[in-house]
Amino acid sequence: MKKLKRSARLVEMTQYLLARPHTLISLTAFADRYQSAKSSISEDLAIIKEVFEGEGIGDLHTLAGAAGGVRFIPKCRKDQALDKIKGICRQLEQPDRLLPGGYLYMTDLLGQPGLLQEVGQMFATAFADRDIDAIMTVETKGIPLAHATSLYLNVPVVIVRRDHKVTEGSVVSINYVSGSNKRIQTMSLARRALREQSRVLIIDDFMKAGGTVQGMIDLLNEFRAVVAGVGVFVESGEVDNEERLLHDYTSLARLTEVDLKSRHIAVTPGNFFKEEAQ
């Protein structure tokens, strides 16, 4: 590209980093791209790093040595994220969202680009220090959440299906027991979708007892994969601790009270915000 003035270079470098999260970029690559000395590039990166960290956009990690460079790690400030999740909780408390069985209608929220961006950034912050190769979710409502998170972690998404599709080719299928209604159900994943021994982050939209998530964990065992973490958008707080099948997870919101008769709903920030909410 043509040589840019420093102000223009800073703008272009910032956009370049934002578009390539968790990617190591060498100083040589930047120097060649902008036809500038490495010392100038280093000064520019120091400015960008200060702004990113000061404004809660993320961290800019520097790796020294011949094979070093910089890596942008997207993050959000917990206080800012808490304000956003409180607003989401207020939306989830609308009485007309209540569905039979104590579930919440969330499809409209999961179709809003701005909300998905915020939620994806929260999940990416929660698992920023994990070594993740892929994000797994089950069809269908978890898909937009998984893709929003993948944009910030820069890893592929694999989708677990409840019904085998011929277009998926050879699949691995398991039976699992739904934690909420104790029914035996089936889920499957194409063999080509995930490399063996991958480190996988599971993302789900709603967790009651954790049967679906536990099913995905069992499915990952068939691929000899490692569960790098579990992120849940909304968890049900009306499940007894001994009834819950999963205990190691991160939730963004918690459904604490549902009164079907009065249609009263109470939603609070999840365990990701435990310290900030106190």
Image: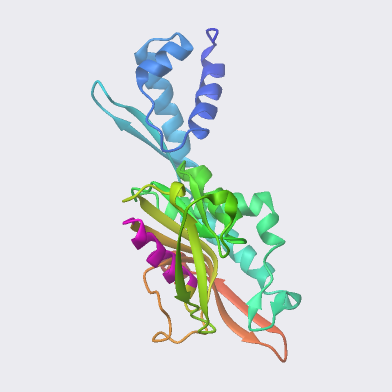
Residue 46 picture location, percent across and down:
39, 27
Residue 227 picture location, percent across and down:
35, 59
The kind of secondary structure the magenta stretch mainly shows is helix
Q: Does the magenta segment cover residue 118?
A: no
211 or 232, nearer to the observer: 211
Q: Is residue 147 above or below residue 236?
A: above
Residue 263 picture location, percent across and down:
72, 85
Quick one: which residue is furthest to the right in this view?
96
Q: Does the magenta segment cover residue 220?
A: yes
Quadrant housing residue 99: bottom right
59 or 141, nearer to the observer: 141
Answer whether residue 137 is visible to the viewer in this image: yes
Residue at (66% x, 58% y) in the render: 110
Q: Is residue 136 above or below residue 273?
A: above
Locate residue 211 relative to residue 259 in the image: left or right: left
Q: Is residue 247 above or below residue 63?
A: below
- Which quadrant, please, contains the C terminus? bottom left
Residue at (39% x, 46% y) in the render: 133
Locate residue 68 relative to residue 85 in the image: left or right: left
Task: Tally the numbered discs.
Answer: 0
> What range is drawn magenta here?
212-225
Residue at (41% x, 78% y) in the render: 245
Residue 129 picture location, percent across and down:
34, 49
46 or 70, nearer to the observer: 70
Quick one: which residue is furthest to the left in this view?
65
Q: Is residue 240 above or below residue 64?
A: below
Residue at (29% x, 26% y) in the render: 68
- Which quadrant, please, contains the N terminus? top right
Q: How is the image coloured?
A: rainbow
